[in-house]
Every structure is written in C-alpha cells, then in structure tokens.
Amino acid sequence: MQRSTDRILTTHAGSLPRPLPLLEKMREKLSGNSYDEAAYNAEVSHAVAASIAKQAETGLDILADGEMSKAGFFTYARQRLTGFEPRPGMKFPLFEKEVAEFPDYYEDYFARAMLGGSVANPVPLVCIGPVKYTGHDLVKIDLANLKAALANTKHVEAFVPSTAPSGIGLNEHYNSDDAFFEALGEAMREEYEAIVDAGFVLQVDDPFLSDICYELKDDKKALDHKAGLYVESINHALRNIPRDRVRFHTCYGINEGPRLHEAALAEVAPYMFRINAQAFSFEMANARHEHEYHLFEQLKLRDDTILIPGVITHGSSMIEHPELVAERITRLANIVGRENVIAGADCGFSSQATFKPEVDPKAMWMKFASMVEGAQIASRRLWG
C-alpha cells in the first residue's frame, strides 16, 4: 500500500453519485421487468471510466470506481450472496438514538432522502439458509471495468470497497450469531481475495462498528461480544490477505442531519485497530469528532499503520477551505508522522444510488479539489 513518502496523498471513501443515464438503467433493472443487460453493462462501464477520469482530473491520487454498479448495501449483498430473503416493511435499526432525539427530522429524512430518490428502496435482508458467495461474475465485471478505466489514467493506486459481514443482514438460520458471522466472513472472503488478486487494495466498509459502540455503550459485555464478532468475522475473511493490501473504513452515518449520540473515536478505536488492515479510514471533519485527533497523542499504533482521516465531510454541502484542510492534515501528521497520513473524506457521497444526493455533485467535486489543494499546502509545511 502506498504511503505519503514525499507529499500527502489524497483519496476518498468509495461511493460517488451515479450519473443520470446509469440511474435510469439501474432502476429499470431492479424493477423486476425485462431490461437490456448489454446496454446496462455498457452504461456501468462508461460511468466507471468517466468517474475515474474526473477523480484524476481533480487531482486525487488513490482512486476507486465510485461503486457505480451497486445500488446500495442490501441490494448489493442480495445480488452476491445466497441464503437471504428481503423483508419489505421490516424495520432495520439505523442510528436509533438520533431518530429518537429528532423524530420529526428523521421521519422526513427517511421518506425524502433515502426513499424518494433511490433507485431501489433499502429493504432489510434476513438469513434463512446457508450463506454462500455467488457474486464471482459480478465482481469480475467490476474489476475489469476499473482496470480498463485506469489503463491510461494518472494515479498512484486504486482500491475497491466491499461490505463487511456486519452490513449484510439479520440471522434467522444459524444457531448463534457466532456461527452466522463466521459464515458471512467465509463467504465475503471470496470477494476480498478476488479484489486483491486483481492487484487492487481492498477497502472493507463497516459503518455498523461505530454504530453499535453507542447503541451498546451502557452494556460493556454485550458491546465486547458484538464488536468482537464484527472484528473476528472480518479477520476470518482476511486471513489469506497481507494486511498491507487492506484498508478499513467506518463512519457514523450516511446522512446530512442532526447528530448528538455518536460514539467517541476513543470508544471505537479499541475494536477498529484489532482489524488486520494497514490503513484506517474514519470521520474527522465531522464537527462532533474533529477534536479527536488528540486521541493519537496517547494511542499506540503499529509502526506501519496508515491513517486516512476525513478532512472533508459528506455531512455538509459547505465547501471546506484549503487552509482548513491543510490544518486538519498537519496537526494529525505532527502527532503520528507525515508518512502515516493520507487525506480522505469522512464517508462516501452516495451510499445509496439516488437521483437526489444530499451534497450536490458539483459541490462534491469542489470539496475534493479543496482537499487536493489543502494536501499540497500541508505537504509544503511538512516536507518544506
């Protein structure tokens, strides 16, 4: 995995807004009606190429396909794993304390932001049979599209996001959650290894790790058990992959909205840094977490650990000033070492494929440009 050896490198968290032509074809595909598969695949390929070109043009160093082929976590899992059935209408717990604190806001948010513009409503999945990975052809297409898009594009490195076991569904089949998560890890291992075998860095996405750290914070025993399952299932899936080919991403929520009850990074870190990855992507531009860089003044990490703090946020349309970005980078780099920091975003800008991304795509690209400029300013300060 590349490090910031002579300047601060830049990257992002994975998901980016899908272009309108792709969204229309994706909605057609997911409607259950007949669709033109060749035309759909061509649109995905075109969208990946355009996204990679735009990322490079903006000046980002470590690129990804923007998750152009994926409609969202649950839809993606349903397409690549057996043993699950969708449960429309079933409640899936999602930052419940925030919803309880701000019920009016989130009632409108879920109706408007997540459902109104999404190509497919996020329907919870329930495990009703043995879990098996069947997405081999789909991941091959993803990897081929990314490889083709990168062929003549200037970049330092490329990564591919893939969901963690915790983001897939609920268990009604296995005798215990331990067995369920072991099965999930074994299934996702096939996708993880395919990504690395293709020459890309794997990013394991687990937004639910930070989520349970505040949901269960008053029950340390339950938290240790559940967070332990999350970590163990990921490490089980990563057992054949060198840790220097893995980055891990967690976040506090996919929305622009009021947040009050998020776990502190200090509460997430003991579990996160047990994961067998070299790089860790997490929120630090989030206004409730920006101060938490101080944690690294006491926290002892492996010497080769790379941190990818969010220096721009998906949770606001405000475009960060490059000087603020540079300040966020340098104050952490001065603690952990300049070569151990890569500038990133708090989270993805379109976790659901939607016609109504919360941050306008033009503003998003301006945010990325500001991050690139801020990284250049920070590099001059850190390297001279």
Image (tube, rainbow, N blue to C red):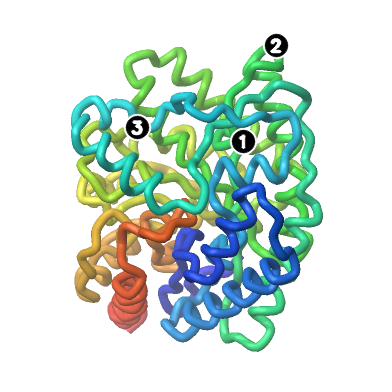
What's under tag 3, amino acid-wise? Phe
Task: Report which residue position mark 3 lands on.
Answer: 95
Q: Residues within 10 Å of mark 3 (few under 14, many from 20)?
A: some
Q: Gap between marks 2 and 3, in whole Å?
A: 27 Å
* Mark seen at residue 130: none
Q: Residue at x 53, y 71 (%)?
A: 21
Find disc 2 in the rendering and name its residue: 175
Residue 197, image x, y percentages? 78, 60
* Residue under pointer 1: 165
First along the sequence among labels 2 and 3: 3
Mark 2 Cα-neighbour bin, 10 Å: few <14, some 14–19, many ≥20: few
Left or right: 232 as drawn, with respect to 55: right
Q: Quadrant of residue 304?
A: bottom right
Q: CA distance from mark 1 to mark 2?
A: 17 Å
Question: Tag 2: residue type?
Answer: Asn
Residue 276 can be seen, yes or no: yes
The residue at the point 60 percent across, 78 percent down is 49
State the residue lying farthest toward the front: 33
Q: Secondary structure at mark 1?
A: helix
| Residue 322 located left or right of residue 193 | left
